[in-house]
Amino acid sequence: MSKFNNPASVGAHGSIRVFATMVLLLALAGCSTMQEERSIGRELDDVNASLAIKSAMIRNEGYALGGVDVEVTEGIALLTGTVPREDDSLMAECLAWSSVAVRAVANELLVGTSASIRNRTNDAWITQNVRGRLLTDRSIRSVNFNVETYAGKVYLLGLARTRGELERASTHASLVDGVGEVISYVRVVGTTSTLPSRGERRAAACGGEATPALDPGDLAPN
């Protein structure tokens, strides 16, 4: 008897086709879900950009950038901390723009004296509490959000699936003791950017001067 006329053989092949179809549907469903979440590739680009910018700041001479914290999320470089002079703040922003993975720079640097250990400890406590609130809210995809705190200000970065999700996250942050202000740099899925071109913003931050673009090779220590 030909195997094509064997009912058992046909049943086996049919089961394989059904299983393959189910796997394909699950994969497509997973892709659809991933479109609303931070991708692994984007996260790697963000990490590499953060390291490259910080490395450039350490190597930079003539500016006091040791107190600058750099966090890149979804292509937005958040600069927090304290620098002694306005020129230091401008140079930090210029160096942040020199990473090709950066599409926006949020310069939140303070000019003056550095924060005390007590204030930094309080900021860390606030950050952990905000993250905890986001984690326990099932309406929020907490892995899509990054939380940073400096001087009692909470900065939200990342990706929100809806504007309502972003509002819930902001509300959670505002309810934590010690929070003075909540500032969002979160991108909402489906919204279009109204920012001017990257070149214009980079030139403005660098006083019209071009700076060498950072790439992974810049991470190697000198």
Image (cartoon, rainbow, N blue to C red):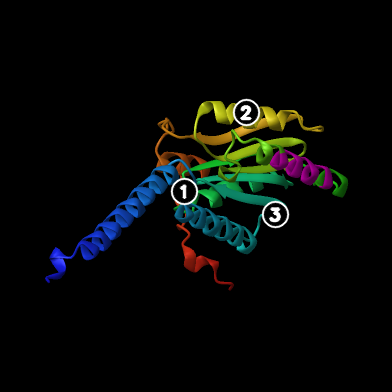
Which label sits on residue 209?
A: 1
Which label sits on residue 64?
A: 3
Asked whether, in this view, residue 47 is left or right of residue 189, the answer is right
Task: List the residue tagged with mark 2.
Answer: 168
Looking at the rendering, the stretch of residues picked out in magenta corresponds to: 121-132
Q: Earlier in the sequence, mark 3 or mark 2?
A: 3
- Of discs 2 and 1, which sits in the foreground? 2
Task: Give 207 or 154, whichever is nearer the viewer.
Answer: 154
Horizontal and vertical percent position of residue 50: 57, 55
Q: Are marks 3 and 1 in contact (CB under 8 Å)?
A: no
Assess disc 3: are there few (<14), some (14-19) or many (≥20) residues with their C-alpha within 10 Å of its C-alpha: some
* Quadrant containing the C terminus in the rendered view: bottom right
Residue lying farthest to the right in this orientation: 118
- The amino acid type of the residue labelled 3 equals Ala
Q: CA distance from mark 2 to mark 1?
A: 41 Å
- Of discs 3 and 2, which sits in the foreground? 2
